[in-house]
Image: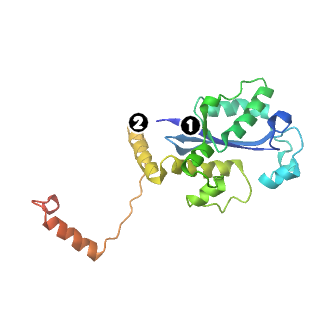
Amino acid sequence: MSRSVLFDTETTGFEPLTGDRVIEIAAIELINDLPTEKQFYALLDPERDIPSDSTKVHGITNAHVEGKPKFSEVAGQMLEFFGDSPLVAHNAPFDFAFISAELERVGRKPLDKSRMIDTLVLAKQRFPGMPNSLDALCRRFEIDLSARTTHNALLDCKLLAEVYVELTGGRQRGLVLETEQGLAFAQYDVPVSRTSRLIAVSEEQLAAHAEFIGKLKEPVWLKE
C-alpha cells in the first residue's frame, strides 16, 4: 500500500518571504490515494496581525489565534505526520513555499520539492482552458460544497481528497482501491465491514435473463 499526505494552509497573505505567515495547517493521510481517519491540524499564532483582507478569505481573526501555539511548537509533530511521503496540495508551490519558509525560520530544512504533487497541474492537464479552482472542480465532479462558506484548511483537505480521487481515476478507481485495501487488511486478520445492498430487478430484466440463459448449452444457473 502506498502512503501520501494531502495538506493545505491558510496564511496572513501571499508573500512568505516578506513577512506573511501560516495561521492554519491541515493534513490528512491517504493510503492508495484514499483518505484514512488519520489527520493533523493546527491553528497557529502567526506572531503578527492578520489583515482584514485575509480574514475575508478564511474567516480567521486575530482573536481566533490568540493563545494558540506558534509554528515552532508544532513543526516536529507536523513533520512526523508528513513522514517521507509524497505531499499533495492544490496550487502546491504556494503551500510548499509557506511551510518551507516557516521551517527555515526555526532552523529546519525546507520541504523537498521532489515530493510535490500539485492537483492544480493535474486539473489543468485534464481540463485545459477551464476554471480549475477547488470550488470549480468540486462543482464539476458534483462534490457537495454546502459547508464551504469560507476557506478552511481541514475542510479544503477533505474536499480536495475527493477531487484527487476523481483526477487520478474517478470513483470507480476508488472502489477498486477499496477492494485492494480490504484484501491487504485481510492478510493481517483486520475485519473490513461491507454493507449489503438489495438490487431490485424488473420483470423485463428477469425475462431477458431467462431468454439469454435459454440460448446457452448446459447453463450453470440451471444446475442444482
Q: Of the two numbered discs 1 and 2 on the same chain, state the one appearing first in sequence.
A: 1
Residue 172: x, y in percent?
A: 43, 53
Graded by Cα atoms within 10 Å as few (under 14), some (14 to 19) or many (20 or more), the crowding at tag 2 reads few
Can you tell which quarter of the image residue 72 is in?
A: top right
Q: Is residue 189 visible?
A: no
Most distant residue in the left direction: 217
Q: Nearer the viewer, residue 159 or 113?
A: 113
Q: Secondary structure at mark 1?
A: strand
* Mark 1 or mark 2, whichever is nearer to me: 1
Q: Is residue 28 visible?
A: yes
Which residue, given by chain and number where applicable, does mark 1 sit on? 4
Whether label 1 touches label 2, CB < 8 Å = no
- The vertical placement of 145 against 111, above or below, is below
Q: Nearer the viewer, residue 148 or 136?
A: 136
- The vertical placement of 117 against 125, above or below, is above
- Quarter of the image where the C terminus is located: bottom left
Residue 195: x, y in percent?
A: 42, 57
- Residue sitting at 85 percent across and 42 percent down? 67
- Residue sitting at 78 percent across and 34 percent down? 71
The disc labelled 1 sits on which kind of residue?
Ser
- The vertical placement of 25 against 166, above or below, is above
Which residue, given by chain and number where applicable, does mark 2 sit on? 188
